[in-house]
Image (tube, grey):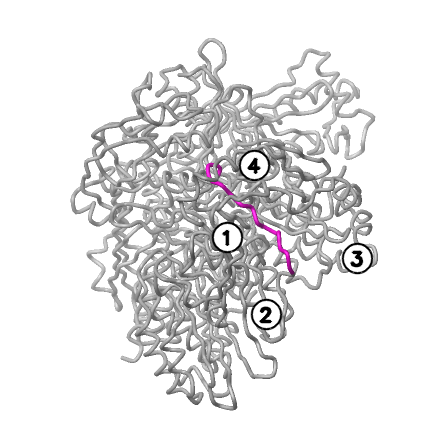
Amino acid sequence: MCFLSIFAFSGQALIPETNIVFLELNKMKITFILNDQVIQTEQSGAGTLLDFIRYEANLRGTKIGCREGDCGACTVLSGTLQQGKIFYQSLTSCLTPLANAHGKHIVTVEGFNLPGLNKVQEAMVECSGTQCGFCTPGFVVSLGGYALQDTHPSQDCAISAIDGNICRCTGYKSIERAACIVQDSLEQQDSARPLDWLVEHHFIPAWFRDIPQRLEALNIPETAFPKTSGRLFVGGGTDLYVQKPDALPDLPINYIFGKLSKAPIESIGNTIHIQGGATATDLMNAPVFLEAFPRWYEYFKLVSSTPIRNIGTVAGNLVNASPIGDITAMLLALNARILLQQENGEERILPLRQFYKAYKTLDKAAGEWIAEVHVDLQKDTNTLFHFEKVCKRTYLDIASVNTAISLKTKGNLLLEAHVSAGGVAPVPLYLDKTSRYLEGKTIQTEMVLEAIEVLQSEIHPISDARGSAAYKRTLARQLFMGHFLTLFPETIQMEALV
Amino acid sequence: MKNIDARNHVQGKSIYLDDIPEINGTLYAVPFDAPVGHARIVKMDFTKAMNMPGIARIITAADIPGENQIGGIIPDEPLFAEGEIHFWGHPIGIILGTSEYACRKAREVIEIEYEALPVITCPREAQKQNHLIAPPRTFVLGDTSEHWAECDYVLEGKADVNGQEHLYIETQGAYARPKEDGCIWVASSTQGPTAVQKAIRKVLNLPMHKIEVDTVRLGGGFGGKEDQATAWAVMAALAAHVVQKPVKLSLHRMDDMRMTGKRHPYSADYKIGLNKDLKILCYEATFYQNAGAAADLSTSVLERTLFHCTNAYFIPNVKATAYSCKTNLPPNTAFRGFGGPQGMFVIEAAITKVAEQIGVTADQIQKANLVRNGDVFSYGQVIDKSEAHNSWNACVNTYNLEKIQAEIRAFNQSNYRFKKGVAVQPICFGISFTNTMMNHARALVHIYQDGSVVVSTGAVEMGQGVNTKLAQVAAITLGIPASWIRLESTNTLRVANTSPTAASAGADLNGKALQIACQNLMDRMMPVAQALLNTEANLQIKDGVVHKDNEATELTWQQLVLQSFMRRISLSEQAHYSTPVIQYDKTKEKGHPFAYHVYGTAILVVTVDCLRGTYVFDEVNIVHDLGKTLNADIDNGQIEGALVQGIGWMTLEEILFNDKGKLLTHALSTYKIPDIYSVPLQINIQHLDTPGHDLAILKSKAVGEPPLMYGLGAYFAIRNAVKAFNPNHDPNIDAPYTPEKVLMDLYSKRKA
C-alpha cells in the first residue's frame, strides 16, 4: 500500500559518503527469535523478512502472493518485549526489512503448530475455510495473532484481525464462521493468566511461555542494530518496499522502526505530540483522539489494513507525499505542525500545509526528518472532525478521493475551519479558500452549496486508474457534503443539497 | 467429509510449486518483456546484463531446438517474441542467474530498441479491420427475420462487459530438471499437465515419453492456468535443457499480471422482441470478443458464449454471431465460466432494458421464458430434466421474492440517501467440454499388499476439492475408509494424454474412470472373498470388512488384499471413461454437446449509498441444483466462492489498459478483488431437491463454474437501485459497475 510509508529520502548526494558505513553495517548480526529458535544472521538488513523466512530459514508455510502488502499471504507476527511482557502484532513480511526483526519474536504459521491442530486451525478446517490453501497460513497467523492480544471484545474485532488477508477461493463466509468460533472460544479466556490459558486450550505451543525470558536473556538492546548514519530512513517499509525493493540493498539505510525515544502519542498542555515513528495503529488507538472524535476508530479502519497499520508510520505517510495519503489528509485538516530535525540538532516547526510544494516535492532540507507532529486540541472548545474516503473497494484500498474537515463552532456559527482533500491535486491539498470561506459563516444549506463552488475552484484532479477527473470532482463535492451531513444532521439534509 | 488437504493447508505444510526444496545448483529464471503494445524489435543488447553479478545466461528464441510455438488450438503464439512484439508484456526471453534478485537487477539493464507499430485494443476496431483470430461463428434457431413483426415490444441495444484478472494467489511457475538420456522432469503449476508436455515436445523437439510433467496442487487456477501455465513451464524446461541444470521460474505478481491473459472482455449488440405475454420471440446478438494477441483458447471460449447466449430461456428464434477479435492485449484465456457468463450477461442486459421499456420488472420476463423439457437450445440440444422452473419457484418461494420487492419499494420511498435494488438471476450451464473429443479421462489405482490404496488420475487439485471427491468415489466403490486412500500428484508418466482440469468436469470425468477402475478391482477380488468365506452369496465390503447379507464376516479388507495377491491377482487397475451421448457438428452448429445442465436461481439485494456511490450487498439467496451432492462442504464452498468471484467481476474488478496497450491495473494495489468486507452480508444457500443425473459422478452434479453466474445479478441489482434514485437516467450497460460508474449514473442528467 503506497499511502502508508516511511520515505524520508534525504537526497542522492549523500549516498556515496555513507557507503563505507553501510558496508560495515551489513556485517553486523541481526538477532531475533524465529518461532522457537534463535537466529543470528549476517544477511543484509535491507532484504525482506519474507525472503529470509522462506529461503534462508526454509520455512515455506509463509507464502508470497503480491510482495506489496495487499494480500496478506506472507503475514507473520512480530512480538516486542516491553517490561518483561511481550506484545504481538501482525505484519506483512514482504514489506518488512529483515533489520526490523532485530530483537523481536517473529512467529510464522509453523510457530503455531502443535502435534494436532491448534484451535484456529481446527476452526478453519471445521468451517471449510480453506480451499486452495495458499492464502490460508496468512489467515491462521492473523487469527493466531488476535488470540495473542490482551482483549477479544467482539466478533467484529476478530474479523478486523483478518482484514488484510485476501482469499480468492472461498468468498470469505466460511472464514468468517471460523473467526466466530475462535472468538467464542477466546471469550472464555482467563485474563489473569492469558498465555497459560492459550497454551492449555491449544492455541499456541507451550514454548511461547519461555519467549519473554529467552528474548531478555539474549540481551539485545533495541536500538543497537543498526546504529547508522545511513541517510535513507526506513520505518515500516510499506511504500519503499513496494516501489523499489531491489534498489534498497544498495542504499545506505537508517532503520528507525520502533525506535521511539518518547511515547508515540502524548498530550502536553493543549497540544498532542505525535512521534514521527508512531504507527497508524498507535494513532488509531490513541485515547486523546478517540475521546475527542467519536468516529476516529472507524476512520482508521478505512486506512489500509491491520498488518499495514501496524508498521506504517505517521512520518512515512507525510514524507511519502502521496496526493492521496489518508493520514496526511486527516492531519492537514487538524491543522498540524511538523517538527523537522537535523543531525546537528537543529530544529524547525512548519505548518504541515506548507510542507508540500509540488508533486513529491517537500519543504525539507536534505538532512532533515520529521521528528514529531503537533496537533492543537483544546478540550473546552467545540471542535468537530470528520473524514471521508471513497475508493473502489471500501477497505484495504487507496482512495479515489479523500477529505477531512475540522471545525470550531459556537452555536450555529463556524469560528474556524480547516478542510483537506486528497486525489484532487498533485499534492495532498489543504483547501485554503474553502476553509477561509467557511469561517464566520452560519451553518446552512446555501453555505454548503457555495462552499462547494469554492472547493471546485481550488482542486485540479486528473484521470488515472483511480478514476476520471470528472468522477473525482463529483466525488469531492459529494464527500464535502458528507462532512456536513454527518456533523450537522439536524441542520443539513441531503434532499436539500442534491 | 472435509477437504483432505485442509489439515496440511492450515498448518502451512502443503507444498506448492515455489515450496519444492531446491536442488543444489538450481538457477532462477526471470522473463523479460517489451514495454510496448506493438512494435518491431530493431536491436537487442545483452552485454550489460550478462556482466551483472550472478547471471548465467540469457535465453531467447535463438536457443530453441524445436519450434518457437506454444499455441494450443491455433499455432499462432510464439514462446518468445521474435522480430515483432504483439502485446505489452510479450516475453522476449528469460534471464538465468543464481537468484531472482540477480536476474531482476540484470533485467533493468537489458537494452532493446523498438520501432513502434499501430496498437489496437478495441475488439470492434479489430473486427472492422478484419483482424480476426478465426472466422466468425453463427448459431441459428428458427428465423428471427420472419418473426419480428409478431413482437409487441422490440428493443435494440449495446452491452459491454470487461475482463477479469484471475488473481490466483499463487502466481504462475514451474521447476524443471534434466534427467539422464535427454529426459526432463517439470513440476508445473498447471491445470493441464498434458498441454505442458505437448508444448515442451514441440519447443524442445523431444518425444513426449521423455517429458515428465508433475503437478501436486495449485494455489488457485480459475482457468488462468489451463493454457497459460504452459509458457512458463516450457521456458523452465527449455532453460534446463540448454544449461543442463535445474531451473526454477516463479513469476513476480506484477510480471504475472502484465504478461498473462485474463477473462475476455466483450462488446455486444443485441435486438430482442417479445409479445404482450412477455414471451421472447426473437433474439439477435453480435458478440465482439477481445481475444488479445493470440488465439490461446479464445475460439472455444467464443463457442461457449454462443452456447449460453440465451441462458436459461427458451427463445424460438435466435441468431447469434460471434467474432474473435485480435488485438494488442495479452492473449485472453479461460476463466471460470469460459465465455458463458459473457453471453448470459448480454441477454440479461436485454431483458432488463426491455423490462424497463415495457414497465415491468425483469423477473416477470425471466420467469415467463424459462426452459422446459422438450424445448430446444439454439445449438439443437433438446432439454430434458430441466430444473429451471423448479429452482426458480423454490427460490422465489423460499426467500419470498414478493416480500423482498415490497420491502424494497417501501424502503426506497422512505429513504433519500440509501436506495435498495433487487435482481433475480437464474442460471443454466452446460457440463462437458464443448470440444467433444476432450471428454474422456483415465484413472490408475494400485492396492498395496498392506491394503493401502493409491490413486492417480488426470484431475488437478486447485482448491476445488476434486481430490477429496475422488477419494470419496474410491472409498465408496471399494468399501473402505477414505483415510486408507491416497491421492497422488497428477503426473504424465502415470496417467497419460489427459484433458486439462476445466469445464467443471474434473470430478465427473476422472471420477467415472476411477469408479470403473475400483469396480474392476472389486470384480477380481470378490471371488477370492467368496472362496475364502466358502460362499457363493453376494458379498460387499463396508468400512473395510467383507459383509455377507449385511453382516460383517471375519474377513477384513487387508486379509482379502493379501490373499488376492497370494493368488496372483493383479491389485492394479487402469480404467478409461468417455462421456456417452455427446456429439456436436460444427458445420451445422447443431448437436448434443452437453452431458447435462446445471440450474439454479439467486436473489440478490444491494444497498447503494447515493451520497458516495458505494454499495453493500445485503443478501444473496440461492437455490442451487447439485443433484445428489457427494460433498456438501465442498459444494457449498464452491457456490460461495464462485458467487463472490462473480460479484467481484460485476462490481470492483476493473481492468484498465491505456490506448498503448499498457495495463494500468497492474497489481493488487490497483486491481481490487473482494476482501472480507465487500462480500454480501448474508449468503443463504439451499440445495434443490433433485434426483441428480446419471452422467454426473454418483449423481452429484458439477459445481465449479455455474454459481459464478449468480454474480451477474449484482450488476442489475445495482442498476435498479441507481434508477430508484435517478429514474430519468438510462445508464449504459457497461460492467463492472464500479463506484465511479454508480456515482456518475446517480447524478447524470438527474435534473432533466
| Labels 2, 3: one chain | yes
Task: For label 4, count other residues whose C-alpha is less than 10 Å away and answer few (under 14), some (14-19) or many (20+).
Answer: many
Secondary structure state at the residue bearing disc 2:
strand
Q: Chain of mark 1?
A: A
Type of amino acid at the residue the image marks with label 4: Leu
Q: Which residue is mark 1?
A: A6
Report the span colored magenta: A249-262
Q: Residues within 10 Å of mark 1 (few under 14, many from 20)?
A: many
Label 3 near label 4: C-beta < 8 Å? no
User: On residue A25, which mark appears?
Assistant: 4
Badge number at residue A51: none
Q: Chain of mark 4?
A: A
A467, B561: nearer the viewer: A467
Contact? badges 2 and 3 (CB < 8 Å): no
Based on the picture, tell me whether residue B328 belongs to the magenta stretch: no
Circle 2 sits on which residue? A272
Residues at marks 4 and 2, CA–CA distance in whole angstroms: 36 Å
